[in-house]
Structure formats: structure tokens, C-alpha cells
């Protein structure tokens, strides 16, 4: 048993979908979450700046004596994970677990949707081809999905129309679709409605939660006596609490604090 907290970070609030799934599987784990909303979105930043921000966040979490870091940001994971692991080896990111699950399920082709930076990095294609070279991969940047989620328009007619515009090219080509952004689980029902039941959706937040549990269990680091979650943000916490409550589907009250890195 290990009572140290798990550190989780994202460029904003999407990583809270990972927190939600980890809390479901591991309700007795203490969690420290940092959402860098003051410098978001990472997707429009240069690679060097993303690495810099990610290293600063990791340094902050390490000061809190964490036992594991979960990089709940696809953009950070796509460009900085190797650098971060040189600093602290106990790191799980949102890319590897979802790729592992997708290649097990896919028979002919995998689709990947995400932010522009994540898609253009090619991280998913490389990882999929390493594990299953014969699988075709089709990728699509869906930049409007994040603002739609943050507006709370997850099931609106506008959102359905945009989903159709982005995703129509996948229909008939793929049998598995990776939701390669931690905002996208909130659109899961709408995406499923648009693309049909014949395509399996793989949720990065759920896959990452299962990997987190497996890692802690293997290392004998599970906590059985905690359950507290503390939130930090790089900007005023009121907006973080408002949007965060949407992502967690439970209210965030006073346990959110602004910090400067």
C-alpha cells in the first residue's frame, strides 16, 4: 500500500474525464490535478513551448510527493512524454493505453480524431503501426469539438451537423475509432449516433484509468485509505470550477486553488 497521491495534469479541463474514470476504478486514491487553463490551449503552441510547460507542471506535481503522474493531455503526451520520463519514470499518458485497446479490437482499420497538434504529430499512427503494422489508420483533426464541449453543446443539432461533417469519411472504412482528446468522451453519444453502431469507440479516459490501476497494482502502490481530490489551476479558479463540474459531472466547490508555476 502507498498513500502518496496520483498527480494528473492537462492543459485545461479535459483531463478531468480521466480523473472521473480513475475515481470510479480507484475511489480510495488521493489525486492532485493541475489544469493549465491560463496557458491553454497547448495545441496552438510550438513543440518547445509545450515541452517547457509540461516540465514546469511535472516539477510542481513532484513537489507534492506524488507516486505516479498521469499526463491527461494528448498534446503534451504527443511531444513531451520522452522528456518527462527522463525526469520521473512513473508516468502514464493517454496515448499508449488507448492504442493498446484499439489494436486488440481492430480487424481492418482504425480512425483517430483529435486536436490539430495531436493529429499532425502522427503519434497515434506511429504507435498503432508499431503494434499492428497491417492495420490501416485514418486520422482527422476536429478542432471545433473542444469549444462545443466547453459550451455544453454536446447533444445539440449544431454539434450533430459538425460531427457529420468531420466523421462521414470514416464510415465504411474503419471498425474502431479512437477518441484522441480528453474532451471527446462528452461527445461519445453524439459521435456514436452519427457513425453508427458498427464502429467501436475507444475512450482514452477509460483506457488510461485501467492502465493506472494496473500500474499501481503491479507496483504494490494502491491506496486503501484515501479518496481526496485537490484541484490546482494556473488561472482564476471560478471558471475552472464551472467547467470542471461539467466534465466531472459532480460539483467542484472550494477545493480549487490558483498557483503560479
Image (spheres, helix red, strand yellow):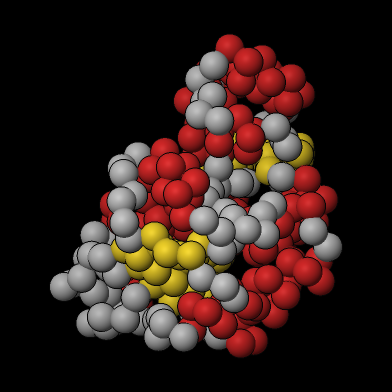
| Residue at 40%, 85% in the rendered image | 65
Q: Is residue 178 above or below residue 10?
A: above
Q: Residue 172 or 35: which is nearer the viewer? A: 35
- Residue 177 in percent (x, y) is at 61, 37
Q: Let me know if residue 226 appears in the view.
A: yes
Farthest residue toward the left?
A: 225
Q: Quadrant of the C terminus?
A: bottom right
Question: In the rendered view, does 70 fall on the left or right side of 3?
Answer: right
- Residue 234 in percent (x, y) is at 56, 63
Which of the 4 image quadrants contains residue 42?
Answer: bottom right
Count of picture labels: 0
Which of the 4 image quadrants contains residue 22?
Answer: bottom left
Which of the 4 image quadrants contains residue 129?
Answer: bottom right
| Residue at 26%, 65% in the rendered image | 228
Q: Residue 224 or 143: which is nearer the viewer? A: 143
Q: Quadrant of the N terminus?
A: bottom left
Question: In the rendered view, does 165 fall on the left or right side of 62?
Answer: right
| Residue at 60%, 42% in the rendered image | 178
| Residue at 56%, 59% in the rendered image | 235
Q: Let me know if residue 101 appears in the view.
A: no
- Residue 45 in percent (x, y) is at 79, 58
- Residue 206 in percent (x, y) is at 43, 49
Question: In the rendered view, does 252 fall on the left or right side of 132?
Answer: left
Q: Is residue 79 above or below residue 190?
A: below
Amino acid at each position: 500500500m502507498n498513500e502518496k497521491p496520483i498527480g494528473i495534469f492537462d492543459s485545461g479541463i479535459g483531463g478531468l474525464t480521466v480523473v472521473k474514470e480513475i475515481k470510479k476504478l480507484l475511489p480510495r486514491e488521493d489525486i492532485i490535478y493541475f489544469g493549465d487553463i491560463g496557458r491553454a490551449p497547448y495545441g496552438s503552441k510550438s513543440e518547445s513551448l509545450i515541452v517547457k510547460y509540461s516540465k514546469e507542471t511535472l516539477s510542481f506535481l513532484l513537489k507534492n510527493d506524488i507516486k505516479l503522474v498521469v499526463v491527461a493531455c494528448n498534446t503534451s503526451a504527443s511531444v513531451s512524454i520522452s522528456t518527462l520520463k527522463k525526469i520521473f519514470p512513473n508516468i502514464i499518458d493517454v496515448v499508449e493505453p488507448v492504442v493498446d485497446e484499439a489494436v486488440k479490437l481492430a480487424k481492418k482499420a482504425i480512425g483517430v480524431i483529435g486536436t490539430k497538434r495531436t493529429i499532425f504529430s502522427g503519434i497515434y499512427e506511429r504507435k498503432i503501426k508499431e503494434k499492428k503494422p497491417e492495420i490501416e489508420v485514418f486520422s482527422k483533426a476536429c478542432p471545433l469539438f473542444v469549444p462545443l464541449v466547453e459550451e455544453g453543446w454536446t447533444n445539440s443539432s449544431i454539434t450533430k451537423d459538425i460531427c457529420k461533417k468531420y466523421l462521414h469519411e470514416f464510415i465504411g472504412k474503419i471498425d474502431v475509432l479512437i477518441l484522441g482528446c480528453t474532451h471527446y468522451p462528452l461527445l461519445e453519444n453524439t459521435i456514436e449516433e452519427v457513425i453508427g453502431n458498427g464502429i467501436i469507440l475507444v475512450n482514452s479516459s477509460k483506457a488510461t484509468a485501467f492502465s493506472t490501476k494496473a500500474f499501481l497494482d503491479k507496483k504494490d502502490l494502491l491506496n486503501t485509505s484515501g479518496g481526496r481530490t485537490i484541484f490546482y489551476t494556473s488561472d482564476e479558479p471560478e471558471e475552472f470550477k464551472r467547467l470542471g463540474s461539467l466534465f466531472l459531472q459532480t460539483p467542484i466547490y472550494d477545493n480549487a486553488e490558483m498557483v503560479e508555476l
